[in-house]
Image (tube, helix red, strand yellow):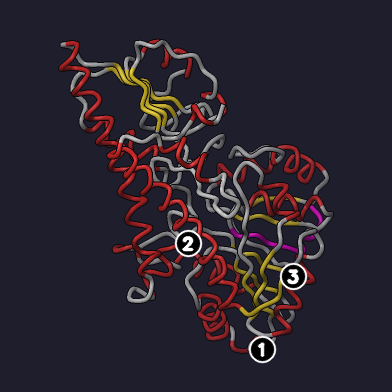
Amino acid sequence: MIQPKVVTIGLGYIGLPTSALIANNNIPVYGVDINQKVVDIINAGEIHIVEPSLDEAVAKAVLEGYLKAGIKPVMADTYLIVVPTPFKAKNEPDISFVQAATKSILPLLKEGDLYIIESTSPIGTTEKMLQYIYSERPELKDKLYIAYCPERVLPGNVMFELVHNDRVIGGVNESSTLKAVAFYSQFVKGELHKTNARTAEMCKLTENSSRDVQIAFANELSLICDKAGIDVWELIQLANKHPRVNILQPGCGVGGHCIAVDPYFIVSDYPLESKIISTAREINNYKSFWCAEKVKNAKLEFKLKYGRSPSVALMGLAFKPNIDDLRESPAKYVAQKVMQDAHNEEYFIVEPNIEEHPVFKLTNFEYAIEKADIVVFLVAHKEFKGVKINADKVIIDFTGVKFQQ
């Protein structure tokens, strides 16, 4: 392989597409992941996740020698940290993965290198990593460029949005910001907005917290409408005819490793000030519990009416339509809660975007709909839209599939 100019730590849903994009711009990239299986798959020019156009980008980059993967980092000029930021107890963010990734490159850093965190992080994380790096490598103090640049992409359209979306880039000082802007300008066509590291960190959290609040409003409406006997999908459709109203669609909660998680980064550090953000999280979490209870009640009503246990189709496990990502998925939570309360019912679990699951036995969606007495739409996958369902079946639609034909 060509001597790498960029090392990416983390080859998941963001790290791999980012690595492939950079490599496709003829910039040699060495991707690092702790999973040897993932490394082997990528080095074979293949991918371990579902994302449109990613397979072609990876195959091209590997074939041309601009992308290689390994389990340990190598020397380069730019280091991108693209690892998860999970939670400890009580929804406190855990930056240990970021620190571990940083620790792995400490021996490789040299004067003039660019270090960028892309992982969603609590405010002040970039500064903490700066202090950590310089405490371990004091001879490099003020001789590195350190910045934060969060991704803002939509699963299912990542390869396009990585190129065309604007980026917010915040350095620990002006020279770091400019160095990072010069780096991203090589492969990003969207506008690059310069700021400082703390503002860039907060910007990422603000974007997803805002969306969480808007979804919470829609989910709260759905709870009210259910009690009031109003079709929430029709209501929202009509309300959105107002030129300054744009209510989002409710669902069975909020999932993914962004919207369902990022607000806690703010709430954890600023609990007294984040009242709306905190309440929105509670509403969206409650909606998943409420959906599970609705399905349980439907099963009981069916048994009382027909004298037998129903068969149930649970349609979708991903956290949003048309992707294979189940992280923080409310649909998966609902399915688990429903099945924990099982009493001799037959279940058909459907997720058309994955081939198998370690817990759920998956079923073809057409077969599930044909055999089930109760059909529960948890995710509005494209396969489910316009599907024919016999009138004698009980339909529970948490996704508005009928309004998305």
Residue 399, placed above or below residue 19: above
The residue drawn where x is 74% and y is 70% is: 77
Residue 12 in sight from this viewpoint: no
Residue 173 on image: x %, y %: 67, 85
Structural distance between the alpha carbons of marks 1 and 3:
16 Å
Badge 1: residue crowd in 10 Å (few <14, some 14–19, many ≥20): few
Q: How far apart are marks 2 and 3 (CA)?
A: 34 Å
Question: For the magenta stretch, what is the residue range?
Answer: 1-9
Q: Residue 152 in magenta?
A: no
- Pointer 2 residue: 209
Q: Which amino acid does label 2 sit on?
A: Ser
How many numbered marks does the figure carry? 3
Foreground mark, 2 or 3, reads 2
- Measure the C-alpha gap from mark 1 to mark 2: 34 Å
Q: In this view, does 239 lie to the left or right of 291?
A: right
Q: For this rendering, which residue is in front, 66 or 366?
A: 366
Which residue is most to the front?
A: 242
Count neighbours of disc 3 (C-alpha within 10 A) and say few if under 14, some if 14 to 19, many if 20 or more.
some
**Foreground disc of the pair 1, 2:** 2
Q: Name the residue under label 1.
A: 142
Q: Residue sitting at 50 percent across and 45 percent down?
A: 239
Residue type indicated by callout 1: Asp
Q: Position of residue 132 (x, y in %)?
A: 52, 81
Q: Which of 291 and 152 is in front in this view?
A: 291
Q: For the residue carrying disc 2, how many other residues have a C-alpha within 10 Å: few (<14), some (14-19), or many (20+)?
A: many
The mark found on residue 315 in the picture is none
Task: Name which residue lies at 42% across and 59% down.
Answer: 86
- Nearest the camera: 145 or 290? 290
First of labels 1, 2 by sequence position = 1
Q: In which quarter of the image is residue 282?
A: bottom left
Badge 2 element: helix
Q: Residue 77 carries which label?
A: 3
